[in-house]
């Protein structure tokens, strides 16, 4: 994936995390943890794409 596509996915996941983080139910907290976990996975791919594009 390209750096811009990864950025857009990361941005969407962050927005989901923010929305779910502000809720008070167990289910919403679970969704917040899932979103931040998925974001964590994309960080590595973003880093690799960023380095590849700068070469």
Image (cartoon, rainbow, N blue to C red):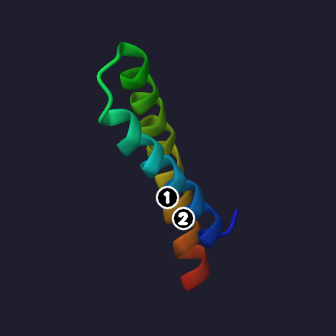
Residue 1: which quarter of the image?
bottom right
Q: Which mark is residue 7?
A: 2
Report the residue at 60% width, 75% height from top.
Answer: 52
Q: Which mark is residue 51?
A: none
Q: Which residue is mark 1?
A: 11
Judging from the image, what secondary structure is the residue with disc 1 in?
helix
In three-dimensional space, the C-alpha distance between marks 2 and 1, rounded to whole angstroms, equals 6 Å
Report the residue at 39% width, 41% height from top.
Answer: 19
Q: Position of residue 53 (x, y in %)?
A: 60, 80
Viewer-proximal residue among 18 and 33 = 18
Residue 32: which quarter of the image?
top left
Q: Is residue 7 left or right of residue 20?
A: right
Query: Mark 2–mark 1 contact, CB under 8 Å?
Result: yes
Report the residue at 44% width, 44% height from top.
Answer: 40
Q: Is residue 12 left or right of residue 26?
A: right
Residue at the far bottom: name it.
55
Judging from the image, what secondary structure is the residue with disc 2 in?
helix
């Amino acid at each position: 994936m390209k750096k811009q596509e990864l950025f857009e996915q990361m941005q969407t996941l962050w927005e989901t995390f923010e929305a779910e983080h502000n809720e008070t139910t167990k289910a919403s907290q679970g969704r917040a943890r899932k979103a931040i976990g998925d974001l964590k996975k994309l960080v590595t791919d973003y880093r690799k794409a960023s380095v590849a594009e700068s070469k």
